[in-house]
Image (cartoon, coloured by chain):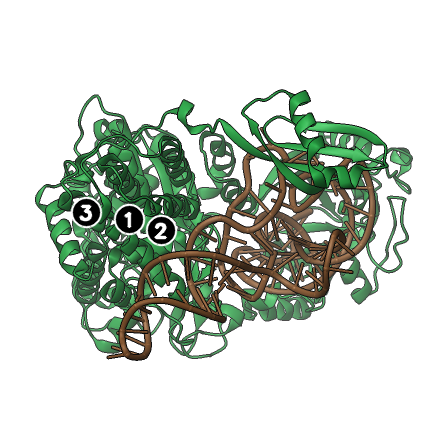
Amino acid sequence: MSNYTEIEKKWQKYWDDHHTFEAKEEKGKKTFYDLVEFPYPSGEGLHVGHVKGYTAQDVIARIKRMQGYNVLYPMGWDAFGAPAERFAIRKHIHPREAVKRNIETFKAQMKSIGFSFDWSREFSTTDPEYYKWTQWQFIQFFKHDMAYKADTKVNWCPTCKMVLSNEDSQGGVCEQCGSQVEQRTKSQWMLRMSDYAEDLLDGLKDTNFAERVKLGQINWIGKSEGVEFDVQIVGGGNFSVFTTCIETIYGITFFVLAPDGKLIQELMPRVKNKKEVEKYIKETSLKSTMDRTELNKGKSGVLVEGVKAINPVNGKEVPIYLGDFVLGDYGTGAVMAVPSHDQRDFEYAKEHDLEIIQVIDGRDISECAFEKGDYLGKGCKLINSEEYSGLTVEEAKEKITTMLEDKGIGRRVNNYKMRDWVFGRQRFWGEPIPMIHCDKCGWVPVPDSDLPVVLPDVVNYEPTEDGESPLAAIEEFVNCKCPKCGAAAKRETDTMPQWAGSSWYFLRYMDPHNNKEFASMKKMKYWNRVDWYNGGMEHTARHLLYARFWVQFLYNIGLVPNKEMIWTRVSHGMILGSNGEKMSKSKGNVVNPDEIVNAYGADTLRVYEMFIGDYTQDAPWNTDSLKGCDRFLRKVERLGEKVVDKTGYSQEVLMNKTIKKVTDDNLSMKYNTAISALMILVNELEKQDEITKDDYRTLLILLNPDAPHITEELNEKYKLGKPICESTWPDYDEEKIVDEAITIAVQVNGKVRGSIDIVKDEDDESVKAKAMKLENVIKFTEGKEIVKTIVIKNKIVNIVVK
RNA sequence: GCGAGUAUGGCGGAACUGGUAGACGCGCUAGUCUUAGGAACUAGUGCCUUCGGCAUGCAGGUUCGAUUCCUGUUACUCGCACCA
């Protein structure tokens, strides 16, 4: 329709006027909570990648509504974050203003594409009415001893005088100014997420996440089971180490401590080469995380003179070293070094000329270590290990562990890569952390009655000289009274990370206007949980983990109805530029959805994005292919001219098959093949001189989730029934989708030589006989011995000859 | 290095629990209609060829039969990156 702009506006107005997509808490209806990640409303406007995810979930929402579910499909804004702040620093426009404008643009764009969001539940994480509850929940973390302040390392740009995220300091260089990033220690708020490591693993059982999403969660948590044991220091004192390879304990030839750990500080008074050790510690602290973790750096380190450690199993005295490959915040910050069976230890030993003792037999170790990945499960036996020599690795693992436990110096321990969540940001544009520091009372939460702690207006958005949030420069914000004792106190000026607001927004949608609670238990119970959550691959690890942690905590203190509030999580592939590269301004390959809507209409854009390929895979944009979808919609439109005043389907089998395929495919994310089924149907109907009203209306309903405007218009134009958005999704008749006559292939030695027509379920003998009569079959079997004939019912015949 | 994913015509991609590989769309070729351009419609379109053969990254294996299952291998993409 050339006047698609008019039609789209008309139906968008109809949906608004009729509140068609607003979810009400009706009783007696099955609920379906359909969620798609809310966007960060950037200045660039909506991206075609957003459109892909929103359309897919819109298809689901529209089908589910027509299937009689009470569907909640909300939208909102994740509007705190660094880009708005950087924009503010450059242009001196308050982020609040910029965000407001961006939200207006985004919303208008979304409306123009016809997503069936329930706009009555819209909110932004930056609304004081919303972040009041983010702050309130932080206070619950604090009250349950889940939030604490601790020294952490931060990436510090000495030029910008700003704390940087890991993303902004890749390669050890500040993304903004290019300076070398330093490591600084800062006291920051932390959430005890590591306490939830096991629960977060365990909770995956109560979800229906896509397998690759579950794996992402598991890898991020990074559980490893092992043994922690105590090591005595010659002349008194001890420390512990964690290992997953206790079977190699007799191979210890030295220990390595983390230069940034507490242990070395404790030992310092006994260290003889203090200067050298201190110098190494200093050097390490200057290296950014990236430098430290980069491979092929060699194994730097220094011998700690004056202290030796004792191997608890054989009493052997071995040296202690410092090495920056050991991390202060993982395990105990100290490792036992077995160069024969760990490649890092091997390299370290070679570099520092240390002893190497092989304790597991099975391979030469002169070139590289014989590691657990190579010896486990292969029946390898221990050597040089006193009474454990001769045992298999697996036997030794268990026996040595038990021995250490019996002696009271070892215990089975799980370690996790996942750390506590660093929750403070020295930024302006975030939720203020609602804490007050009083010299007498320590940290005191802001009383509920004083929430929210509203972000004040500031003149300067730059961080202060010493890298604090710009809030620290506002005296009237910082200075306050202690809520406990009334003495003069100071307000926390750090703000929360962007992950905070997005960790619970899906709960707020269930009860978005509540001003007494973040959401009422009653409403949360009504909606139960998110049934289907869709978003980008890049968020399947961290955002999802933070959100699950947040929910599990709320569950444990009785504030949400389920331990897992998200049932299915799926993620879609990216839309790449037409050159196959990621869309970016600098590459000039960005496609603006507005231009497509203007040139082809929203329906064409939607159909194209669903047709582009496998939903879960990346796919490049192709404007020619888009035109094909436009052509398809025009065909559907022209088909209307053939409608005659008849009921019933003109092709029962085809129609029933199509209904089944479109329903099943859409609900299992195979949006592309659902559309292809509709194209086949249209191609068939086109061949007929006339089509019935039922033919056409069913086609329009099936296409409606993808192309909601044009289908409503055609439905109205040909007076086929009430608006599709108020209609019921068609059913199919299982018995009618099977063809009675089937054509099957006949193979000779696995090669297709012809085909025969059979009746459904025709018996094998008769099928065989038909096959043998084929000219081509006779030709290829003539003069040969028929070894056997395989008949697969309704599928294929294969004749094997010699 | 570890983990995950992907690999099918000129292109995007189909193919149920192993059963006619290339659905559907794009592009391309020829034709019809048009003053022309475009649109629309019709027919064709994996490769090599005479029967026929060869084709799902590569090399093997299992099977009457493999894009699908198994072993090995290569390339690319993403995530994590010295996690003891």
Compared with residue A197, is residue A467 higher up or lower down, i.e. above or below? below
- Quadrant assignment for the N terminus of chain A: bottom left
Task: Work out whether residue A235 or residue A555 is closer to the camera in this orientation and state it.
Answer: A555
**CA distance separating discs 1 and 2:** 52 Å
Q: Position of residue A660 (x, y in %)?
A: 39, 33
**CA distance separating discs 2 and 3:** 26 Å
Residue A36 at least partly seen: no
State which chain is coloured green: A
Task: Work out whether residue A15 or residue A29 is closer to the camera in this orientation and state it.
Answer: A15
Q: Which one is in front in this view, the residue at disc 1 or the one at disc 3?
A: 3
Pointer 1 and pointer 3 on the same chain: yes
Task: Work out whether residue A650 or residue A677 is closer to the camera in this orientation and state it.
Answer: A650
Kindly identify which residue carries mark 1: A440
Which label is found at residue A698? none
Extreme residue toward the left, this view: A17
Query: What color is chain B drawn in?
Result: brown
Q: For the residue marked with disc 3, what is the amino acid? A: Leu
Binning the other alpha carbons within 10 Å of mark 2 as few (below 14), some (14 to 19) or many (20 upward) gives many
In this rendering, position of residue A503 left or right of residue A412: left
Under tag 1, what secondary structure? Answer: loop
Kindly identify which residue carries mark 3: A714
Q: Which one is in front in this view, the residue at disc 1 or the one at disc 2?
A: 2
Q: Given the image, what chain letter belongs to the residue carrying mark 3?
A: A
Q: Residue at image x 24%, y 55%?
A: A113
Q: For the residue marked with disc 2, what is the amino acid? A: Gly
**Nearer-N-terminus badge (1/2):** 2
**CA distance separating discs 1 and 3:** 73 Å
Compared with residue A471, is residue A385 higher up or lower down, i.e. above or below? above
Q: Residue at image x 40%, y 76%?
A: A586
Pointer 1 and pointer 2 on the same chain: yes
Under tag 3, what secondary structure? Answer: helix
* Contact (Cβ within 8 Å) of mark 1 with mark 2: no
